[in-house]
Image (spheres, helix red, strand yellow):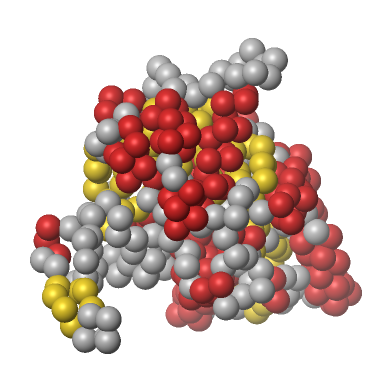
């Protein structure tokens, strides 16, 4: 049994997977790059092919895994987002089964993926990738001044959503220099060969081999020629693009060790892991709005320390005006402190601002209204109206992908009791931000 170190695929869960990955969330509108000071760039056109025609049999689900949803979005949309946020990637071709073309078109439109177009795939993985490569070549023939045939094509699995820009840059530049480049990871398990009757034949020295992963990059000419020259057997049974480049073009791929985040959603449990990673990344920070109230500012300072102990950093500001509006571009969580009897008017104003900013398109926003009231407050009629009012407001906000929760906090002159209440608010707030549970939307919780 011959084993090539670029032919090994690792579909199992990687024990080195990190808790989260910070590079998957754009801070601007969908389809636009998240410009940062350390942003990389390339001086040649790069495009992406995402094969997404799999049936997802190993997940045990009726829906193909690339179309399974969590936090309101299908998995493939998260993968597209990871590429779309990279400014130097000019276009993305998603290759799907013919019966899923309409579904894919709807996803592109619903989440405003501006760099993407869907094309029908083939009966096997290589046939689908070939269709995607050919589609990129057709772009040159279309009358679009901004897009030309790419010099480098990056091929990536639609079910690997956590690829970051730095590694894409490494793959793209290595592919431009060497003709082909691919990600590899250390083997997790020893590979063995078996006899025809099911007994151990021999094992391989694990240190000499690597698991071939995605993404992989090629100059357009190399991957195009490889598919033009490969055999029907390759189309039917092959899975490794780097092998085609070597066999039919004589191009030896530059292999680059990738980060643990390149893992692939293969089984049902992987969908839960992916959701957990995204929730963790979304819950790292929140913006607290005090409304300019001194009492709210004091509470905010106490919460800043208490919530920070739960792993969420709080940015305290008086409002969302002027320079403070920067929070609208970077945060997914907002805490509105209210210490007067206007009840939900502060929250209504915030929801209006968030809706205008179109912040909830890609990820659900969490808005937590913390109402601080005096223990002797006598607004009985107002209190009675609060639960119904917040439920109505939350129901409307949920339709816009905004999750609204309420926390009632009573001011206490007893220092020890007050500290316990603040600690309780911090626990509830951290849990709401972390879990993003639709079941608790509209609830007015007591601290």
Q: Quadrant of residue 307?
A: bottom left
In the rendered image, the quadrant that contains the C terminus is: bottom right
User: Relative to the observer, which residue lies in front, 8 or 352?
Assistant: 8
User: Is residue 112 visible in the rendered structure shown here?
Assistant: yes
Q: Residue at x 60, y 19 (%)?
A: 140
Q: Residue at x 54, y 55 (%)?
A: 124
Q: Residue at x 67, y 61 (%)?
A: 72
Give the farthest residue toward the top.
145
Please give left or right for residue 162 compared with residue 275 in the image: left
Q: Quadrant of residue 166?
A: top left
Q: Is residue 390 above or below residue 88?
A: below
Percent position (x, y) of residue 402? Answer: 71, 57
User: Is residue 280 visible in the rendered structure shown here?
Assistant: no
Please give left or right for residue 365 compared with residue 386 in the image: left
Percent position (x, y) of residue 173? Answer: 32, 28
In the rendered image, the quadrant that contains the N terminus is: bottom left
Q: Residue at x 39, y 22 (%)?
A: 42
User: Relative to the observer, which residue lies in front, 139 or 173?
Assistant: 139
Picture mark count: 0
Please give left or right for residue 14 compared with residue 404 in the image: left
Percent position (x, y) of residue 377? Answer: 75, 73
User: Relative to the observer, which residue lies in front, 211 or 282?
Assistant: 211
Please give left or right for residue 19 compared with residue 193 in the image: right
Percent position (x, y) of residue 164? Answer: 40, 44
Q: Is residue 346 above or below residue 443?
A: above
């Amino acid at each position: 049994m011959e084993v090539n170190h670029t032919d090994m695929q690792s579909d199992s869960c990687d024990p080195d997977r990190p808790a989260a990955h910070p590079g998957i969330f754009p801070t601007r509108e969908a389809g636009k790059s998240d410009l940062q000071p350390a942003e990389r760039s390339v001086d040649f056109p790069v495009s992406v092919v995402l094969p997404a025609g799999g049936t997802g049999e190993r997940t045990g689900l009726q829906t193909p895994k690339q179309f399974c949803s969590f936090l309101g979005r299908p998995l493939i949309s998260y993968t597209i987002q990871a590429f779309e946020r990279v400014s130097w990637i000019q276009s993305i071709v998603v290759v799907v089964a013919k019966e899923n073309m309409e579904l894919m078109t709807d996803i592109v439109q619903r989440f405003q993926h501006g760099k993407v177009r869907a094309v029908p795939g083939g009966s096997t993985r290589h046939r689908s990738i070939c269709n995607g490569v050919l589609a990129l070549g057709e772009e040159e023939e279309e009358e679009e001044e901004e897009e030309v045939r790419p010099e480098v094509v990056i091929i990536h699995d639609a079910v690997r959503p956590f690829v970051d820009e730095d590694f894409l840059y490494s793959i793209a530049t290595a592919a431009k220099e060497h003709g082909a480049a691919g990600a590899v990871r250390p083997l997790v398990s020893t590979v063995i060969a078996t006899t025809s009757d099911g007994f151990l034949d021999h094992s391989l020295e694990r240190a000499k081999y690597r698991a071939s992963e995605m993404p992989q990059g090629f100059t357009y000419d190399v991957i195009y020629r490889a598919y033009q020259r490969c055999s029907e057997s390759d189309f039917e049974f092959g899975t490794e693009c780097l092998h085609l480049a070597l066999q039919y073009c004589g191009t030896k791929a530059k292999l680059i060790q990738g980060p643990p985040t390149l893992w692939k959603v293969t089984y049902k449990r992987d969908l839960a892991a992916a959701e957990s990673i995204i929730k963790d990344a979304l819950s790292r920070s929140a913006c607290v709005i005090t409304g300019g109230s001194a009492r709210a500012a004091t509470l905010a300072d106490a919460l800043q320390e208490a919530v920070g102990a739960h792993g969420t950093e709080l940015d305290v500001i008086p409002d969302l005006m002027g320079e403070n509006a920067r929070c609208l571009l970077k945060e997914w969580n907002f805490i509105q402190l209210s210490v007067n009897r206007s009840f939900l008017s502060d929250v209504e104003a915030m929801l209006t601002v968030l809706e205008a900013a179109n912040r909830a398109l890609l990820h659900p926003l969490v808005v937590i209204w913390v109402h601080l009231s005096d223990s002797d407050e006598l607004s009985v009629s107002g209190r009675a109206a609060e639960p119904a009012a917040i439920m109505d407001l939350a129901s409307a906000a949920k339709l816009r992908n905004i999750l609204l929760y309420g926390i009632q906090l009573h001011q206490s002159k007893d220092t020890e009791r007050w500290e316990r209440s603040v600690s309780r608010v911090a626990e509830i707030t951290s849990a709401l931000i972390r879990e993003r549970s639709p079941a608790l939307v509209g609830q007015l919780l007591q601290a």
